[in-house]
Image (cartoon, grey):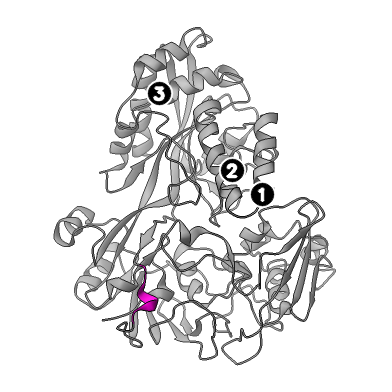
Amino acid sequence: MKPPLHLSLAILAAAAALLGAAGASGAESSTSIRKGGVFRVAFQSGAVDFVDPALAYSVWSWSLLDTTCARLMSYPDKAPPEGFRLRPEVATRKPLVTNDAMTFTFTLRRGFRFSNGARVTASAFARAINRTLTPGLDSPGAQYTQDILGADAVLAGTSQSAPGIVARGNRLVIRLKHPTPDFPARMTIPFFCAVPPSLPSDPEGLRTFPAAGPYYVADYRPGTRIVLRRNRFYRGARPHHVDRFDVDLRATTSQDVLDRIEQRRADWGNTGLVEAERLAAKYGINRARFFLKTGLTSRGLAFNTSRGIFGNNPKLRRAVNFAVDRSALRRAIGSPLTASLTDQFLPPAIPGYKDAHIYRLLGPNLRKARALAKGHTRGGKVKLYIQNVPVRVVQAQILTENLRKIGLDVETERIPPKAFLERVLSPGEPWDIAAASWTPDYVDPFAYLNVLFDGRFIAGGLNPARFDSPRYNGLLRRAARIRGSRRYHAYGKLDVQLARDAAPMIPTVFTKEPTFVSKRVDHRCIVLRPALDLAAVCLK
């Protein structure tokens, strides 16, 4: 499987999809919550790529489509960690899993309807999956469906639908070529929202179409405006307070978006961290208008565990983790408002996460680092690959000084960002440490631990450390097959083991997700999981 855009090493590039976690709870039970009104959104030009679920692949497109989406499996509109517990939505229960996680059978609830009144049946999801395989459409969703039996024939244009997808009434059966225990979590991605069974495929992307979620796209004028209206046939459990979302796509900069929100010309938008210090001083943090939550994008450094000084050398990898000054590396990115320090691979918002305090976050522990490094430095020469951008250059200087104190001599190679991924993934490249970041398309421990550290993903470019341990491969694959709360517990334990004992990477931070809303927005309906949950918002 090729590296996906969102599920990509931002070894290759700075990850754009920041996510945060937390939010108000109890708004649904309050009789004083206002129903109705128009929620106004301001986006910078280019923030939205498509509104067609088979093609949309920007974080801002997904934030809008989330309001229109009815999924087989989903996450509740609640603050994490509860908001990241996988649960059925249109499916009546979790799927029946057979044939070594190669066959999944979903039974659908009755009562879901599209915005045109048509009933949602299994064929709606079969069509959504097959649309991602349409030849010439180039759907980024195909990376998650090409392992379905018969997908190759659809991609080649010799079949209209994959025989591994069988829809009869309210029963959907999916058969895959390989064990895929994370398949139910994949179904939460907007590519797989229910769509009308006759919905055509257009490489330009459809602009309006019936949707089965709380809202639907009523109008889309690229580069100008999007209007989302309430689905009057929606009877699902998701919140849907406002009548309409008006999205202005003509903001020029992050500052322009921020100004519009402060001036009450917009209620929310993609501000980024512009003027975060001023907003924090003026409005406070996590009170009513300005929110900062730890997101799901991790940044750090990967060891090349397949060769050289760090191959089969966990003591030295642990020594480097103790020697690194994580707080100094964060300062190179910006203020503490930009990122939360970490020494683990799972984000704190994931169910099952355990804060194990493995390494020192606010400075190095040279005593432990030197003790572990003694006798394991193998000549002490380290080749570091970084993107040739200012932040990474400063971090390389910090890392070089950190490692010098435990007897390691770092040689840094600066690589143009566009060439970085290809260089790092090439088997013949002699790097020992490389800059890395990670953002998953779907929120599941598998998308962090298995994808990053199971040896089977090395060939697909999704295991940056080239970590291939029979012991951990087995533990990761067993955890993926567990269901329910035990699964999250198993992954939480594995996260600690990997970071503490195997140390295939140097985790440093999870970037923070900013949310700024206008004075019109009722803070009781703000749910951050971790970006703003638009379906849940309400107005004063």
Q: Which residues are magenta?
A: 25-30
Q: Is residue 184 left or right of residue 531?
A: right
Circle 3 — which element? helix
| Residue wearing tag 3 | 322
Q: Position of residue 485 (x, y in %)?
A: 57, 53
Q: Earlier in the sequence, mark 2 or mark 3?
A: 3
Q: Is residue 403 above or below residue 532?
A: above
Q: Which residue is mark 1?
A: 482
Kind of residue sitting beneath label 1: Ile
Q: Which mark is residue 490?
A: 2
Q: Is residue 535 above or below residue 483?
A: below
Horizontal relation, residue 205 to residue 274: left or right: right
Instruction: Give residue 448's quadrant in the image.
Output: top right
Residue type (three-letter) at the residue carrying disc 3: Phe
Q: Quadrant of the C terminus?
A: bottom left
Task: Assess whether mark 1 and mark 2 are in contact (beta carbons under 8 angstroms).
Answer: yes
- Few, some or many C-alpha atoms within 10 Å of disc 1 (few <14, some 14-19, many ≥20)? some
- Decide which of 488, 67 is in the foreground and name it: 488
Secondary element type, mark 1: loop
Q: Pointers 2 and 3 in contact (CB under 8 A)?
A: no
